[in-house]
Amino acid sequence: MTANELNTPGYEIPDDLKDVVAITTLDKVYNFGRRSSIWPMMFGLACCAIEMIAAQASRYDLARFGMEVMRPSPRQADMMLVAGTVTKKMVPAIVRLYNQMPEPKYVVAMGACASGGGPFKEGYNVVAGIDKFLPVDVYIPGCPPTPQALVYGLIKLQEKIDKQSIKTVRWYQKGADSVETPIPFLGPDLIDPRRIPEIKAKAAELANPPAEAAN
Amino acid sequence: MTTPAVETLDLAAKFAGVTADTRPGYAGWIVPAEALTQFASFVRDELGYDLLSSLTAVDYLEQNQFEVVYHAYKTAGGPGLVFKVQIPRQDPAKVASVTPIWPGAEYQEREAYDLYGIIFENHPDLRRILMWEGFEGYPMRKDWKEAFYEEEAKPLKSRWPEGRHTLAETRVPFGDNVSFKPGFDPEKWTPTDPEELLYATLRKYTSETKDGITTDHVLVNMGPQHPSTHGVFRAVAMLDGEIVVSLKPVMGYLHRNHEKIGERNTFLQNMPYTDRLDYFNSMYNNWGYSLAVEKLLGVAVPERAEYLRVIMGELSRIQNHLILFGMLWNDLGAYFTPALYAFEERELILDIFEAVSGTRMMCNYHRFGGVSRDVDAASLEKIKGLVFERLPRRVEEMNRLLSENEIFVSRMKGIGYLSPEDSIAYSVTGPNLRAAGIPYDIRRADPYGIYDRFEFDIPVRHNSDLLDRYLIRMDEIQQSLRILRQALQQLPEGPVLTGKPQYQVKVPAGEAYGRVEAPKGELGYYVVSNGKGNPYRYHIRTPSFINITSLEKMCVGGKIADFVTILGMVDIVLGELDR
Amino acid sequence: MYGQGLLKGLSVTLKRYINTYVDDFKWWGKRYFNAEGIAHRSSKDANGIFTVQYPEEKLPTPEEFRYVPFLVYDEGANGEKNIRCTSCGICAKACPPQCIWIVRSSDPVTGRPVPQPAEFYIDADICMNCGFCAEYCPFDAIKMDHDYELASYGRNVFDKERLMKPASYYAQIRPLNNAREETARAEKAAAKAAKAAVTN
C-alpha cells in the first residue's frame, strides 16, 4: 500500500488543508499494520513445506512482505500455512496448534493435498482437505505450488485482510471468543467430535439396514 | 569383485529344507518358517551376507498365504540373496523375528506387523509404527478396503464415458474418508490411549538408584511440530538431566499410503508418486522405480537417456547435500545464512530441472526405457556452466565458510558415534555407512545404469561421528562433480526413449528388486507383477526409514541437544520415512 | 590458532556482503525490473542479491513448465470455439490420481456418440501436475498451463468452460512444441490426402 492509498479516506479534504493534514480511516491503518506483518507458523508437513522454505529463502524472500519471522510457537503466529498432506495421525496436533493461535488468525491451504486431499486423497490415512477442520482463507492449487504461486496466494490473503473492517471482524464482537475447533481423536478411525451423532446414526443404520433397503 | 555370483550357490543342497523358488519370474529361495533363524544366521555368518537390505511382506490372497521377503547383500559388493518365508494366511500369522541377526530389521518388521498383521516372534518391541495403536484392521491386506475405495485397479470406470464429477465424500456412507464397523457407537466406545504402549516401553527407565540416591528421569516429547525435526517427526526421550537414557522415534505423521495407492495404480501411474517420496530427489526416486520395472520388462535404455539419468541424478545429489549443510547449520543455531547460500545453488539446479522436466521438484522425468524428454541446448549450456564453473567455486566457498569453524567442529567431533559393526548390523546405508569406514556404494558394489563407465572414488572416513558424516558429504559432492564432468563430455546424441511412449505397459508376471544409491542411502523398490496392468505388490525400501533404526543407539548416552544434530545428519526426509 | 576457522568463515560472509554492492554498481540501473537483469540473476554468474521481486518481477517460465492442465480450442472463422478434444478418454485413463471426469456427448437425434466432450472436469485439488494427460493425448487437445496464479478463496474444481483456452494462447506459451505438433499434423493430413488421391 502506498502512502497515497493510505491517505484516501473517501472524505473531501478542504483545499486549504490539503498537503497539511492526512486523514485516513482506522480500518486502513489497522489493516495496513496487520497485512504487513503476518507471521507464519513454522510448520511444514510434506513436499509443499520445501517450496515454502524456498519462498522464505534468498530467491523469493518473503521478508519483502513482512512474513519472514517464522514462529515455531503457535502463540506468536498469525497465520497457519498448511503446507502438505494432512494425515489422520497428524490432524489432532494441527487442530490443537490452531486452537492455541491468538486471534486474528488465518489459515492458508497450500497445495492440492491441504486444499482437498490431493493425489493421496484415496489413501486410508489421509484427511481430504484441512477445511474439514479449520476455516481456510486462501486455497493455493498446485502440486506443489511454485514459490511464486505461494507468494501470489499470500498476496491474495493480504487483499482479503484489506477488505476487513474493525466493526465487523469476528474477534472484536461482543462476547467473541477465540474460535476453537473440537480436537478430533484417534479411535478405530479418525473421529470428529462434531460428527459423533451422525456417525452413531449411520453406523446403527449400517448394522440394521432399514426394511426398504433390505428388500 | 571376487564374490561368487549368486546363481552358483545351491542353497537347497547346503541347507536342509530350503527349496528354490520356481514360480515363473521369481528367484531366490523358500525357507521353511521353523528354520528361518538358523538359515538367517547361516546366510550371515557362513555366506557373508551381512547387510539386510529389505524386509517386507506380500499378501497372496488366492494362495491363502503371506510371504515375508528378505533381500540380503554383502557390504563387500556383488549380487544379493533373496529368500522368502511362506506362512498360512490366518490370524495370528507368526514368523520368527530376524532382529537378533540383523537389528536393522526392527522397524521393517514393525511395519510388516502394522500393515499386514504378521506377528514377529521375539521381536523386542512389536508395536504399530505408521498407523496408531487401535486402528481397525491391517490396511495393506488385499481384502482390506479404504473408505474411498472404488475399484480394485485404475483406471476407474466412473471417470469415462459418463464421468460426472462427484466428490468422493458424497459416495461414502460416513461422508468423509473414514469407515467404522456397523453398529459402532462412538459414545459407548471406551477410548484407549494410542500412546500407552509407547510410554510403557519407556517406563522401565523412569527412575534409577545410584549410590543409594534415587533419581527421577524426565520424559520429553519432541515433535511432531518441532522446528528441528525436519518435518512431522516425533521423538520421545527419557532424560537423566541432559543425558539421553532412552529415545524412541515415533513416525507415521506423514504416512500417505504410497504402497496401497501404488497397488491400485498402473505401473506408469506410480512414477509421479515416487517423486513425492524423497521430495528433494525426485530424479533419483524415479530411477529406482524405473530400474525395477525395466528388470521385469526386459527393456533396454538408450545411451543418451542413460547419460541424462546420471546427469540429473548427480545434480540432485549435489543439491541434496547442500541443503543438508544449510539445514544442519540451522539446527546448530547459525540461523539461516548457510541455508540461504545453499538455497541459491539449489534454485539454479532446480531451474535446470524445471526447464528439462517441467517442474522444480516433482520431476516425473523417467519412463520405462528412457526419459520423458530430451535436454535442450540452452539447458545443457546451463548445466555445463554450473558444473564446470559455478558449483566448484561455490562448494569451495561453502567449505571455507563451514568446515573449519571451531564452534562447528566442537559440536560435531566425536558426537553420535556408531561403530562400523553396528552400522552394518542396523542396515545403515549411504554416506553414514561410508563415514564409518565401509566403502559400500551401490554405484560400485552393484553397478546400475552406466556408472561402471565413470572414474570416481568412493570417499571413506573412519571416525563415524557427525563431523565425518558432514565431511564425507563434502567429498561426495566433489565426486559427483567429477562424474558430471565426464558425463557431460561423453554425452552422445540419439533417442532418449526405447519404443513409443505408451501409457499402459504390459508387465510380465514376476518380481524384481531395483535399488539405487540415492543421496540418502540405498533406495530399493520391490515390485511384484501378476501380469496385469498394475503391480500386485509395490514396496519401497527407503533409506530414511531404515537409517533411523540406529538413531536410538547413536543418541543414548549423549546430550539431548545433540539429538537434533544427530537426527539432522541421518538426513531423513519425512516423505520417504513415512511413505 | 583458535578462531581462525571462524574468521575464515566470516570472511566469506563479508565478501558476499561487499559483492552485493559491487554487483549492484556494475549493473547500475539494469539489474532490477527488466528481463536482462533477471536472466543475470539466475545465471551461473549470479552474484550479490539473488532475489527476484515477485510480483513486480517474474521469473520467465520455461517452455516445458507445467501447472494444471487446460483444453485447447481452435478459433473458427466466426469466433466459434472448436474444441480439439474428442472425448476419447485417454487422459482420464492415464491420470494417476484420477482427477479427470469426462462425459461423452451423443447426437440428440440418432443417439450415437459424437467426438466431443459434453462435460469435462478437472479437480485441481486432486491434480498432481504430472503432465501425463498432455503427454499421452493423441489429439494435442489437453496441455499443461503456465499460469500458476490460481490462488482463490474457495475450492478449485474446473469445468469445461474454465478449462478452455485458445490455440493462440498455447502457441504463445509453448512455441516450439506447438510448431512441432503443427508440422506433424500437417504431414499427417498430407499423407491422408495423398492416400485418398491414390485410392481414387
Image: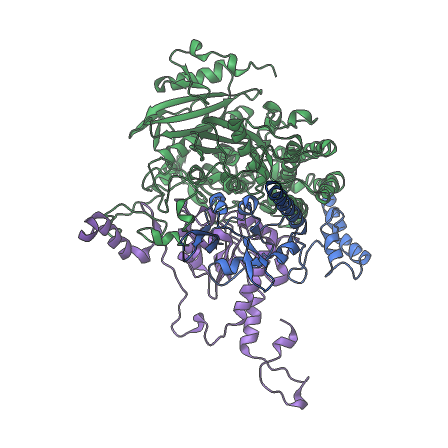
Answer with left or right where residue B562 lies relative to residue B454. left
According to the rendering, which colour does chain B have?
green
Closest to the observer, B238 or A160 = A160
Query: Given the current orientation, which residue lies at the most extreme front position?
Result: C200
Name above or below for residue A178 compared with residue B497: below
Q: Is residue A183 visible?
A: yes
Q: Does residue B436 show up? A: no
A122 or B522, which lies in front? A122
Q: Position of residue B39 (x, y in %)?
A: 42, 16
Is residue A152 shown left or right of residue A168?
A: right
Query: Which corner quadrant of the image does residue A6 belong to?
Result: bottom right
Query: From this viewpoint, which residue is outermost toward the top?
Result: B13
Which residue: 56% across, 51% down? C141
Q: Quadrant of residue A152?
A: bottom right
Between residue B276 and residue B550, name the one nearer to us. Answer: B276
Colour style of the rendered protein structure: by chain
What shade does chain C have? blue
Q: Position of residue B513 (x, y in %)?
A: 50, 27
Q: Which chain is purple?
A: A
